[in-house]
Image (cartoon, coloured by chain):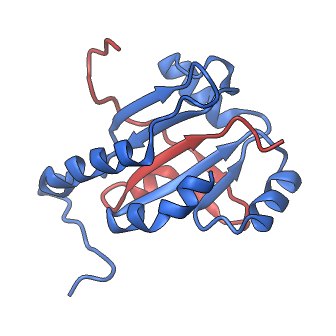
Amino acid sequence: MAQLRQDYQKFVERITEIITVGPEDANSFTKWWHEHEMPFIGIPDPTHEIAKLYNQQFKFLRGGRLPAMVVIDKVGRIRLMHYADLPSDIPTDEEVLALLDKLNGETGGIDNKSPVVEPNSK
Amino acid sequence: MAYENQNPAAPDFTATDSEGRTIKLSDYKGKKNIALVFNRGFF
């Protein structure tokens, strides 16, 4: 999480939002989130609804207790799903950023019918 | 992983985040890529 926080701007530059889902209850999650000043979106999921949603459809979370990462492109398609066999076994930020560069290279990762409007572009 | 569709649609969800905001995954469609991180827990 600390590495993600450090690299957050690199994700922003790649037109990417980080959404983190955690198993804590809302109070514990929010307290931790604020204490660590996380700059991206954090969602407490104590009933594992979101984890189950992805587990049920893709059979990859194995109960939702090990870390996992899903990269979704601008069209809403899953382009990477990685679940960890070990708690430390997650893709590096460099690997994910390289994938995002590739996705953004695919005509911005979006079809021509839905042009992307960048908030800061002129 | 063997999928009939190699790039399946991400299941949509709506949830409340740490700031009390309603986050709907599909709101980002056509706007941003998403890195969805499932954390194993802080404690």
Placement of B28 over or under A45, stated as above or below: below
Placement of A61 over or under A98, stated as above or below: above
Placement of A55 over or under A95, stated as above or below: above
Front residue of A99 and A43: A99
Image quarter in which the C terminus of chain B is found: top right
Front residue of A87 and A58: A87
The residue at 54%/63% (across/down) is: A6
Image quarter in which the N terminus of chain B is found: top left
Query: Chain A's shade in the image?
Result: blue
The residue at 88%/55% (across/down) is: A27
Query: Furthest residue to the bottom?
Result: A122
Tell how many labels.
Answer: 0
Left or right placement of residue A94 versus residue A69 in this view: left
Placement of A36 over or under A97, stated as above or below: below
Query: Furthest residue to the top?
Result: B2
The residue at 73%/61% (across/down) is: B18
The residue at 48%/20% (across/down) is: A58
Left or right placement of residue A4 versus residue A106 in this view: right
Location of residue A117 in the rendering, given as x and y in whole percent from the top left corner:
26, 73
Left or right placement of residue A82 versus residue A61 in this view: left
Q: Quadrant of residue A52?
A: top right
Left or right placement of residue A55 versus residue A49 in this view: left
Front residue of A70 and A110: A70
Location of residue A108 in the rendering, given as x and y in whole percent from the top left corner:
19, 58
Location of residue A4 in the rendering, given as x and y in whole percent from the top left corner:
54, 55
Location of residue A115 in the rendering, given as x and y in whole percent from the top left corner:
19, 65
Chain colored red: B
Q: Quadrant of residue A79?
A: top left
